[in-house]
Amino acid sequence: MDPAEIEFIAEDQMVEIIPKFNHLNLIHLISGDVGPFRAGIPVKVPLWLAINLKQRQKCRMVMPEWMSLDTLSQIKEDEKGSRFFIKMPSEHYMEMSHMILDVGADDIANLDQVRTLIKDIWDLRISKLRSSIDTFVKSGGGHATLNHLTRFEINSIRTILCDVLGTMLSLKDASCEVDVMNATTTQSQSQS
Amino acid sequence: MIESEPAENEDENYLSVQKVLETIKTAWRNEKLSPEILPNKMEYVDCMLEQIKQMEDNIEKLRKDDIRIEIHRMEIERIRYVITSYLRIRTENAFLSADEMKYARDYLKSVDNHFNKYLNLLPPNLRTLEDKNKLIKPDLNSYVFLRAGKDVPNVYIKDMSENKEDEFVLDEGSQHILPYESIAESVKNGDVELM
């Protein structure tokens, strides 16, 4: 999948905004109702709408709670301390934070620190992912459980890992066929 | 008008439109990641296109400076993107236009010529090549990532190192990487989603 498409999927996630306009009736979107919008009163909308309103200067973005320095630092520590991938507060933490930090920059305090913490968490998880893939491939493949890995993380290793496993499988099949052929040859020889 | 449209008795209907949209989005994501063509969801697509048409008619009736116009248009564009992309993946795999058909026929002819040229050099009993051996089949053994939407028992996976099959249960919400073939049915019936 194209990373842009995973961002597109992430844009359906709900986020909070503070509108700068009033629209007191609900807006009936196909994907569900949004609103009512009252200037200064926080309201939840899909991220794609938040980005659009923000770009038109019709709202301020509110960072999700998990993007606070405290929460991110805690996540980073937990990720460091755990052998497994920890459950992230959002399945789209990487894409969402990327878009929110990009579009909502002027609404966000500690922008650089938030960005650095997210990058640290990503790096920790990706390095954990690389070493578990190494173990998985060396064990001969077959099946692995990858709980709490996000779509974006999976996408970063999909092509290479699926290629490697596919090749391993076909080599294994080929060597089985050779075994079978050898066995038949020996058999027919012993019969003759 | 859009504002007054969903009266109380339409609430149920309204929910199901969301459900239709979710179904299409899931089908789109799965189709992109699946090595084979999945059962089509055309009735959902048709229903959604109808819904979009109604919405566009309603937008026409709004005042030009209404803030809702751009919001509805944007949502419609997003849904159109998903539907177009979904149909494109399926078309690439399944249907051919007249020109593509001609290309495919010519290609097959040239492959046949090529094979026949060399097959005739082989001993007579090896000269026939069945059509099924010429097909490039989707590799159903290719690995996929997935999440189980519910408990999925009886998943059999080949153990590559020992040439046997192992049985697994996929717990609801768990994520795995495994050969597509072992969960193909669960993808088709919606028990698991490809990631």
Image: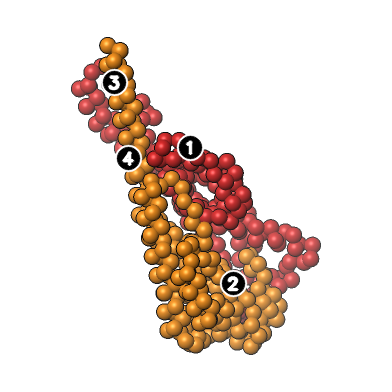
Task: Kindly report the distance in space between the C-alpha atoms of the residues bearing marks 2 and 1.
Answer: 43 Å
The picture places residue A48, in percent across and down from the top left corner, at: 53, 72
Which label sits in the foreground, 4 or 2?
4
Figure quadrant of residue A160: bottom left
Q: Colour of chain B?
A: red
Which label sits in the foreground, 2 or 1?
1
Figure quadrant of residue B186: top right
Name the residue beneath numbered marker 3: A186
Name the residue beneath numbered marker 2: A14
Are labels 2 and 1 assigned to the same chain? no
Task: For mark 2, give the secondary structure.
Answer: strand
- Relative to A158, A33 lies left or right: right
Q: Chain of mark 2?
A: A
Dots 4 and 3: beta carbons under 8 Å? no
Q: Chain of mark 1?
A: B
Name the residue beneath numbered marker 4: A171
Q: Residue at x 29, y 20 (%)?
A: A186
Q: Quadrant of the C terminus of chain A?
A: top left
What amino acid type should be assigned to the residue bearing mark 1?
Glu
Task: For mark 1, give the secondary structure.
Answer: strand
Q: Residue at x 62, y 65 (%)?
A: A31
Mark 4 or mark 3: which comes first in sequence? 4
Task: Kindly report the distance in space between the C-alpha atoms of the residues bearing marks 1 and 4.
Answer: 18 Å
Mark 2 or mark 3: which comes first in sequence? 2
- Relative to A60, A33 lies left or right: right
In the image, which lettered chain appears orange?
A
Which numbered marker is on residue B165? 1
Q: Chain of mark 4?
A: A
